[in-house]
Image: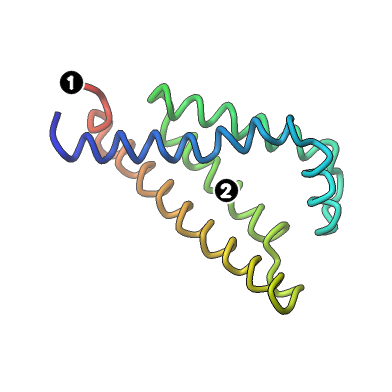
Amino acid sequence: MSMEKYAINTGRILLAVYFLLPGILKFISWDLHIGLMEKHGMPFVTILLPLAALIQISTSCLILANRYVTEAAMVLAAMIIAINISLHDFWNYSGIEGAHELQNFVKNLGIMGGLLVLAGFSYNKPDITKPV
């Protein structure tokens, strides 16, 4: 396997795990996540939280299985946009809390960049992530 395939496969797996574990933790730490969403003024939290968890778990499993990677990565990228606007609203906070939300906002942009690169590689080179 070439270095390019190792890099793509490792990145693909790491991105999938990045979303899989928090998806599972949303069910395990239900009240914590409900509180976080309510703190940021999100509506319909009892509907949106399980939906977010199921999206994270299902798309992560697709990416891990190397199936529909482009589509799964694009769904997660769209989810990051929604999360950044609704949960990492640094413009509504000051001090350390504002700095923390800004850091999460920017970190998520980097993760979204990784997802878009993965989607692009998977779409343009469908064989690049396939094991030899």
User: In this figure, which residue is indicated by the disc labeled 2?
Assistant: 78
Number of residues whose C-alpha sits closer than 10 Å to that of mark 2, classed few (under 14), some (14–19) or many (20 or more): few
Nearer-the-camera pick, 132 or 72: 132
Q: Describe residue 93's horizontal placement relative to residue 72 as left or right.
A: right
Nearer-the-camera pick, 71 or 54: 54
Residue 123 marker: none
Q: Describe residue 125's horizontal placement relative to residue 110 as left or right.
A: left
Q: Describe residue 19's horizontal placement relative to residue 132 as left or right.
A: right
Q: Amino acid at mark 2?
A: Ala
Disc 2 and disc 1: Cα gap in Å?
A: 31 Å
Q: Earlier in the sequence, mark 2 or mark 1?
A: 2
Which of the image's four quarters has the N terminus?
A: top left
Residue 9 location, quadrant: top left
Q: Position of residue 28 (x, y in %)?
A: 73, 30
User: Contact (CB < 8 A) between labels 2 and 1?
Assistant: no
Q: Describe residue 92's horizontal placement relative to residue 7 as left or right.
A: right
Q: Position of residue 37 (x, y in %)?
A: 80, 50
Residue 31 location, quadrant: top right
What's the residue at 71%, 57% (across, down)?
87
> Looking at the image, what colour scheme do you see?
rainbow
Q: Is residue 63 above or below residue 104?
A: above
What's the residue at 37%, 36% (across, down)?
12
**Comparing marks 2 and 1, which lies closer to the viewer?**
1
Q: Amino acid at mark 1?
A: Val
Residue 132 marker: 1
